[in-house]
Each structure stands twice: as C-alpha cells, then as structure tokens.
Amino acid sequence: MELLKVQGQLDWKKLTRNVLIPVVGGSLIGYFANRNTQEQYAKLEKPSFSPPGAAFPIAWTALYTMMGVANYRVEMKQQTQLKEVAEPLYDVQLGLNFLWSFLFFKWNLRGTALVEMTIMLGAIAMTAYEFNKIDRTAGALMVPYIGWVMFALTLNYSTWKLNK
C-alpha cells in the first residue's frame, strides 16, 4: 500500500484512471489489432525463444499496471516543471506501444514495426529517466517494461528475419 501513497496521500480516483488507461487501452488495442489475424500469425515461423501466446496478456497486464502506477506517482508530485517533460513523453511512448500492435499484427508491417519499436524503446527509456528525476519509485517501475520491450524487439526482429 505504501507504493500507492505519494507524499503520504493516496488518491484512488487518479490511481484508477492512471492504471485503467493503459490496461483497458492495451486490451482494446490488442483485441482490434489481433482480430482475424490468429490464423496468419500461427503460420509464421517464430524463433525458438518465442513464449507461448498465453504469456503475452499476462505480461502486458502487469506491465501496463506498473506503467499506470508510475504515471500516477509522477502526477501526484508537485514539481510541475519536471512533469511538463515527463507526462508528454509517457503519452508518446504509450501511443507508440498501441500503434505497434497494428503495425505488426493487423497490417503485417513487421519491418516497420521493428523500426517503430526501436523508437518506442527510446521513448520509454527517456520516460523512465524523466520519471526517475521526479520520483525514484516511478522510474524503477518502468524498468521491467524496458526489459520486456528489449525482449520483444529481439522477438520482432527474429520473426521479421525468419519470414522475409
């Protein structure tokens, strides 16, 4: 519970909004981007280290929740000048995150998705850096996301390479 308190305060409304936006947004994007693509994806050659499909919703729900908590912690801080950089970066990386699913699954633009994910990784790293300047816990909450996206980047590259 201490993780959710910022400067001794807990704002359930802000916390709920900050967590639901990436979790629900990611779920909706996943649904729309993956709708009618399962057969096609099943036919792709995948690298040996590709996790089972069931791992992705579990991982992304956890990551989106941590991102939302991180953004909530930053939003609760009073340092408005630092937030002017951090919060727009957060929005950019989240938008890039949502776009990637369409590029890779729906539109079959795996090479473009790879380039986009590289840019997204940079945006995530910059967001984590800016979050860390405002709140060390918020910055730390972004680290697993960076790790997962680095893994996903390798997976994207390998899938693209195997299916050129």
Image (spheres, rainbow, N blue to C red):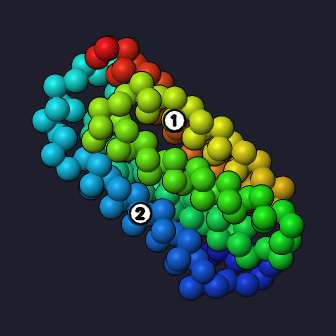
Q: Is residue 90 left or right of residue 151?
A: right
The image shows residue 105 at horizontal and vertical percentages of 30, 38
Q: In this view, does 62 lie above or below 123?
A: below
Residue at x 19% of width, y 41% of height: 37
Q: Is residue 151 visible?
A: no
Residue 39 vs residue 109: left or right?
Answer: left
The percent position of residue 131, horizontal first and vertical second, equals 75, 57
Q: Which of 132 and 127 is in front in this view?
A: 127
What amino acid is at disc 2?
Gly
On the image, which quarter does residue 155 sit in? top left
Image quarter of residue 32: bottom left
Number of the front mark, 1 or 2: 1
Asked whether the beta carbons under mark 1 and mark 2 sit within 8 Å of each other, the answer is no
Q: Which residue is drawn at 60% across and 66% down?
A: 69
Location of residue 54 with respect to 158 vertically, above or below? below
Q: Circle 1 is placed at which residue position?
A: 116
Query: Which numbered disc covers residue 25?
Result: 2
Is 149 rendered above or below residue 77?
above
Distance of label 1 from label 2 (alpha carbons):
19 Å
Quarter-wise, where is residue 132 in the image? bottom right
SS at mark 1 in the image = helix
Answer whether residue 68 is visible to the viewer in this image. yes
**Mark 1 is on which residue type?**
Glu
- Closer to the chain start, of discs 1 and 2, is 2
